[in-house]
C-alpha cells in the first residue's frame, strides 16, 4: 500500500522530485535532439529570420512607414551577414540553440511535472482554485516568448545591428552574439509574462496583497520602465512598446490578488475588501 504524502519522509519526497525532474529533463532532451536534426528550420526559418526584410514584423513596420511617409520606421530593410570566428563556434551554437528550443517547447510538460509534484501537498480547495494553472502558465510563457521574438527581437536586431560609432568601424556580427541576443530577449520576455502567476502564488501565501500592489503601483511602473530599458535597444519607442504589456500584466495581477484576498477573508469570516 502506497504511503500518503503526509507519511513520506524528506528523502522519499526527494526521490519523487527526482523522478519528476528526470522526466522533465528527458522531454527537453528529446525535443532538443529533434531541434538539432532539423537545424535548417530552427536556424534559417526561425532564428535568423528576424534580420531579413521579409520577416513579418519587418514587413509590417515598413508598410506602416510607407503609409505615414516616415522611412526611419522601416526596420531591417538591409539584411546583414553573420560571421563565425571560432573553430567550434557553429557547432556549439547549434547545440545551445537546440537545448533552448527543447526547453521552450517542453515548458508546458515541465510545468505540469512540477505541478504533479506539488499537487499532493495541497488541500482540495487549493487544488480547485489552482485548476488551470498549467494551462495559464504555459499560455503566458508562450505569449511572452512570441512577444519577445516577433516584437522586441526585430527592434533589437535593427538598432544594435545597424548602430555605428564611426564610418571607419564596420559591423560584422558574430554568430554567438546574435544568437545570445535573440534567445535571451525571447526567454526574458517569456519569464516576465509569468508575472500574474508569480503574483497569484505570492498572494496565496500572503506575501503580497492587492493593497500592497496598488500602493506600490508607481514604483512598479518605474521598475517596469527600467526593466524594459535593459532588455530592449536604448530608444524610447522600444521601451514603451515593451513596458505597455508589462503594465497590463501588473494590473491583471492586482485583479488576481484581489480575488484571492477576498476569498481568504470570506473563509475567515471577515469583511472582504471591495
Image (cartoon, rainbow, N blue to C red):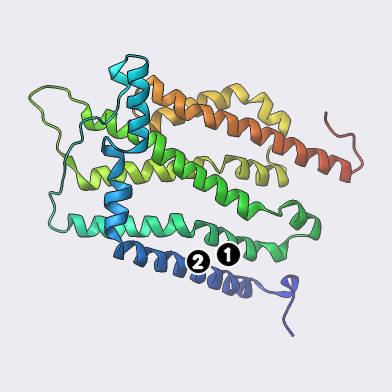
Of residue 244 and residue 62, the one placed in the foreground of this image is 62
Q: Residues within 10 Å of mark 2 (few under 14, many from 20)?
A: many
Asked if residue 168 is positioned above or below residue 28 in the image, the reply reads: above
SS at mark 1? helix
Proximity of marks 2 and 1: CB atoms separated by less than 8 Å: yes
Which residue, as the protein is rendered here, is positioned at the far right? Answer: 269
| Quadrant holding the C terminus | top right
Q: Position of residue 54 (x, y in %)?
A: 29, 37
Of residue 227 and residue 237, the one placed in the foreground of this image is 237
| Quadrant holding the N terminus | bottom right
SS at mark 2? helix
269 with respect to 118 (left or right): right
Q: Residues within 10 Å of mark 1 (few under 14, many from 20)?
A: many
Residue 219: image quadrant is top right
> Which residue is the site of mark 1?
113
Q: CA distance from mark 2 to mark 1?
A: 7 Å
221 with respect to 176 (left or right): right
Q: Position of residue 176 (x, y in %)?
A: 23, 48
Reading the chain from its start, which is encountered first: label 2 or label 1? 2
Which residue, as the protein is rendered here, is positioned at the far bottom? Answer: 1
> Which residue is the site of mark 2?
24
Residue 273: image quadrant is top right
**Residue at image x 34%, y 20%?**
65
Asked if residue 232 is positioned above or below residue 116 in the image, the reply reads: above
**Residue at image x 25%, y 55%?**
93
Q: Position of residue 173 (x, y in %)?
A: 18, 39
Residue 32: image quadrant is bottom left
Amino acid at each position: 500500500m502506497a504511503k500518503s504524502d503526509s507519511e513520506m519522509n524528506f528523502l522519499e519526497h526527494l526521490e519523487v522530485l527526482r523522478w519528476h525532474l528526470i522526466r522533465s529533463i528527458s522531454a527537453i532532451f528529446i525535443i532538443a535532439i529533434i531541434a538539432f536534426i532539423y537545424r535548417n528550420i530552427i536556424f534559417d526559418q526561425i532564428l535568423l529570420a528576424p534580420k531579413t526584410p521579409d520577416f513579418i514584423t519587418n514587413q509590417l513596420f515598413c508598410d506602416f512607414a510607407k503609409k505615414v511617409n516616415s522611412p526611419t520606421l522601416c526596420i531591417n530593410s538591409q539584411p546583414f551577414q553573420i560571421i563565425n570566428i571560432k573553430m567550434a563556434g557553429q557547432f556549439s551554437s547549434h547545440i545551445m540553440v537546440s537545448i533552448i528550443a527543447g526547453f521552450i517547447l517542453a515548458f508546458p510538460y515541465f510545468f505540469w511535472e512540477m505541478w504533479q509534484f506539488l499537487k499532493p501537498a495541497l488541500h482540495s480547495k487549493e487544488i480547485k482554485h489552482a485548476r488551470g494553472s498549467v494551462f495559464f502558465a504555459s499560455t503566458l510563457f508562450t505569449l511572452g516568448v512570441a512577444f519577445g521574438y516577433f516584437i522586441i527581437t526585430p527592434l533589437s536586431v535593427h538598432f544594435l545591428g545597424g548602430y555605428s560609432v564611426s564610418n571607419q568601424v564596420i559591423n560584422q556580427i558574430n554568430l554567438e552574439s546574435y544568437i545570445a541576443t535573440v534567445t535571451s530577449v525571447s526567454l526574458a520576455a517569456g519569464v516576465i509574462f509569468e508575472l500574474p502567476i508569480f503574483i497569484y502564488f505570492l498572494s496565496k501565501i500572503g506575501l503580497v496583497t492587492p493593497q500592497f500592489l496598488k500602493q506600490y503601483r508607481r514604483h512598479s511602473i518605474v521598475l517596469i520602465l527600467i526593466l524594459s530599458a535593459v532588455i530592449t535597444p536604448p530608444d524610447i519607442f522600444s521601451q514603451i512598446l515593451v513596458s505597455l504589456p508589462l503594465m497590463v500584466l501588473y494590473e491583471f495581477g492586482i485583479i488576481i490578488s484581489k480575488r484571492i484576498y477576498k476569498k481568504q477573508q470570506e473563509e475567515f469570516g471577515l469583511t472582504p475588501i471591495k
